[in-house]
């Protein structure tokens, strides 16, 4: 084809365009990876709960921070929701001291061993009812803190410091943009409220397992799906809107830049286009050659950008406190397809110019 033959003969010029496409693709992929990473930081632990729905206090406005449940409410939710299995879960944010002495924050989740709220342990041992001073921490907590399974960590809450031993590690992820830490619910009550009397809330939320639970409500409680619960995490909606806007601008600018490059190339070839039209080439045939060039260059650019992005992510993850960037196969596939499509859309500018070329005028301008 003429389009491929031109690429072969003008290697340097098209290589520069391919470099621009690669850089644009790399930028858009990194933005998308940032969006995925921020979502994981916001609440991957919530998404990994072994539950189909989450029940809140009716006065909390679907906020885990504001939701507090009494034992009576826990019993009512268990009976009224129709869940096959239910488990209370407590939440609080507290500070811990890293190995280097710095103070950081973590999300502490109180659960009952043997319930659906219990996380899966990937290293070390599970918590038992006797481990009142034991913790299960996410692997990201170990990476950030410099601690290991078996070490002792100091937790600060309500002007009180208390030492805990890290019993095991989990892979549940983060919660409220903090590494997740699991402890016994009874210990969580003591830390958060300082007492475990009858007036003290016993949980923040309830995890429910079963069919048709989302949307149910009762006296003083309401249940929603995990996706709705995630969307109501403070800061998530604003963060997602920002990332989606950046992503949209990335696709738009990428398509426009590629379109402008090929439009300029088309303007430089007015004489050749006019000559080809004079010998019988149709506008559609010539536009098809442009589209073939755009497709080849954009595919090459995306193909080079993907491994570069993957390598960058691997390097970033080696840092003690890495930027929250993550990728999935779906991220790479969706981004690549959309970038190629936007490049083809941008090339429509060239198609309009090709159709407007009059062979007689074009050849006259070459005289």
Image: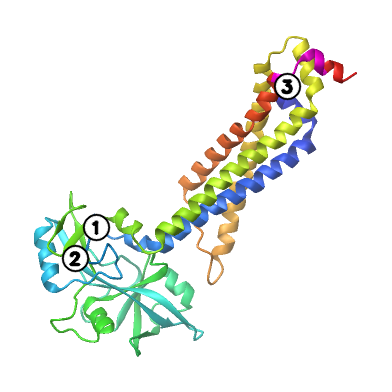
Asked which secondary structure carries label 3, the reply is helix
What residue lies at 66% left-to-right and 24% top-to-bottom? Answer: 352
Q: CA distance from mark 2 to mark 3?
A: 67 Å
Does residue 138 appear in this view? no
Secondary element at tag 2: strand
Q: Which residue is mark 1?
A: 51
Quadrant (top left, top right, bottom left, bottom right) of the N terminus: top right
Horizontal and vertical percent position of residue 300: 64, 39
Establish if 13 lies above or below 89.
above
What residue is disc 2 on? Answer: 87
- Residue 209, image x and y in percent? 19, 56
The magenta segment: 356-362
Say above or below: 25 vs 224. Answer: above
Q: Disc 2 vs disc 1: Cβ atoms closer than 8 Å?
A: yes
Residue 32: within the magenta? no
**Main SS of the magenta segment?**
helix
Mark 2 or 3, nearer chain start: 3
> Is residue 188 shown to the viewer in this render?
yes
Foreground residue among 308 and 237? 237
Tell me if 171 is positioned left or right of 361 in this view: left
Tag 2–tag 3 contact (CB < 8 Å): no
| Camera-side residue of 359 and 41 | 359
Q: Position of residue 291 (x, y in %)?
A: 64, 27
Mark 2 or mark 1, which has the lower sequence index? 1
Spot occupied by residue 213 in the image (x, y as percentages of width and height):
18, 53
Cα distance in 3D space between marks 3 and 1: 58 Å
Q: Which residue is tagged 3?
A: 2
């Amino acid at each position: 084809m003429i389009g491929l033959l031109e690429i072969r003969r003008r290697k340097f010029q098209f290589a520069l365009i391919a470099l621009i496409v690669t850089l644009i693709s790399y930028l858009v992929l990194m933005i998308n990876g940032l969006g995925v990473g921020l979502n994981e930081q916001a609440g991957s632990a919530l998404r990994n709960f072994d539950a189909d729905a989450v029940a809140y206090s009716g006065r909390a406005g679907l906020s885990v921070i504001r939701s507090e449940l009494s034992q009576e409410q826990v019993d009512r939710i268990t009976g009224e929701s129709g869940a096959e299995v239910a488990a209370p879960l407590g939440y609080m944010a507290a500070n811990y001291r890293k190995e280097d002495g710095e103070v950081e924050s973590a999300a502490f989740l109180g659960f009952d061993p043997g319930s659906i709220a219990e996380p899966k342990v990937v290293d070390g041992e599970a918590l038992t009812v006797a481990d009142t001073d034991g913790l299960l921490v996410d692997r990201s907590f170990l990476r950030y803190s410099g601690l290991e399974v078996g070490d002792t960590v100091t937790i600060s809450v309500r002007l009180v410091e208390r030492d805990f031993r890290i019993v095991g590690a989990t892979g549940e992820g983060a919660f409220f943009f903090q590494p997740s830490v699991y402890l016994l619910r009874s210990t969580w009550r003591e830390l958060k409220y300082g007492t475990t009397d009858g007036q003290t809330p016993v949980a923040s939320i309830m995890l429910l397992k079963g069919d048709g639970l989302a949307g149910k409500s009762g006296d003083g409680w309401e249940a929603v799906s995990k996706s709705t619960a995630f969307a109501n995490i403070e800061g998530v909606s604003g963060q997602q809107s920002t990332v989606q806007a950046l992503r949209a601008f990335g696709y738009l600018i990428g398509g426009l830049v590629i379109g402008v490059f090929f439009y300029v190339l088309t303007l430089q070839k007015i004489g050749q286009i006019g000559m080809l039209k004079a010998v019988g080439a149709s506008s559609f045939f010539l536009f098809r050659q442009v589209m073939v060039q755009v497709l080849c260059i954009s595919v090459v650019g995306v193909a080079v950008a993907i491994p570069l992005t993957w390598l960058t992510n691997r390097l970033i993850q080696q840092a003690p406190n890495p930027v929250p960037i993550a990728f999935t196969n779906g991220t790479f596939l969706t981004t690549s397809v959309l970038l190629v499509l936007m490049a083809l859309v941008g090339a429509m500018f060239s198609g309009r110019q090709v159709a407007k070329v009059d062979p007689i005028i074009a050849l006259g301008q070459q005289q």
